[in-house]
Image (cartoon, rainbow, N blue to C red):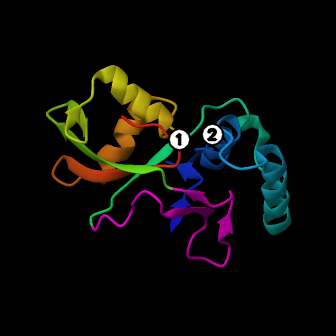
């Protein structure tokens, strides 16, 4: 299944391609990560006539993604096709196909200035929310909260954490 990613949030680069590749190479999620990374960078340069932004080389890994999944289509074992510009003529798969390792249910609320997160019905501490935010590719917990608050309906959001690593909360 395709996981489409944006390259910006609020008109600022999010470096999700580089963050996902950081996890792929650090955790050796494919057979020859350095070789494959060079191949995907070459394909990107050929398709878009520009290189990936190398100023993002010192960033933290993005180890999962949080998506609304009301029909619960995502399951362990699904193949993940990482892509940008999904459903367009410029669609680009920027990483090898990697199996989904697990899916966890996440519920977020933001009411009366309080932001709370439960994963599989377990409440997260502020430190655990920070870890979740960083592992999801955000630099700060505030940007994580702002992003997901904007997606909430009536101050609530129910979603899935799609894992391509062994990490679980």
Q: Position of residue 109 (x, y in %)?
A: 20, 41
Could you tell me which quadrant the C terminus lies in?
top left
Residues packed near mark 1 inside 10 Å, few (<14), some (14 to 19) or many (20 plus): many
Q: Which residue is mark 2?
A: 23
Residues packed near mark 2 inside 10 Å, few (<14), some (14 to 19) or many (20 plus): some
Q: Nearer the viewer, residue 52 or 118?
A: 118
Q: Is residue 96 left or right of residue 8?
A: right
Q: Are marks 1 and 2 in contact (CB under 8 Å)?
A: yes
Q: Position of residue 6 (x, y in %)?
A: 55, 57
Q: Quadrant of residue 130?
A: top left
Q: Is residue 111 above or below residue 154?
A: above
Give the magenta part as a residue range. Answer: 71-99
Q: Is residue 89 magenta?
A: yes
Q: Nearer the viewer, residue 21 or 120?
A: 120
Q: Which residue is mark 1?
A: 63
Q: Secondary structure at mark 2?
A: helix
Residue furthest bottom as drawn: 89
Q: Is residue 19 above or below residue 84?
A: above
């Amino acid at each position: 299944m395709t996981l489409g990613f944006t390259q910006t949030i609020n008109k600022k680069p999010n470096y999700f391609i580089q963050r996902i590749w950081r996890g792929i190479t650090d955790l050796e999620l494919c057979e020859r990560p350095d070789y494959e990374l060079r191949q995907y960078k070459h394909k990107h340069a050929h398709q878009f006539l520009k290189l990936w932004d190398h100023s993002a080389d010192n960033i933290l890994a993005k180890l999962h993604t949080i998506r609304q999944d009301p029909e619960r289509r995502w399951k362990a074992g699904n193949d993940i096709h990482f892509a940008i510009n999904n459903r367009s003529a410029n669609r680009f798969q920027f990483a090898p196909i990697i199996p989904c390792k697990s899916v966890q249910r996440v519920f977020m609320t933001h009411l009366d200035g309080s932001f709370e997160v439960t994963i599989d019905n377990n409440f997260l501490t502020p430190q655990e929310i920070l870890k979740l935010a960083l592992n999801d590719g955000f630099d700060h917990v505030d940007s994580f909260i702002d992003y997901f608050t904007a997606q909430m309906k009536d101050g609530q959001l129910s979603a899935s954490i799609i894992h391509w690593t062994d990490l679980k909360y």
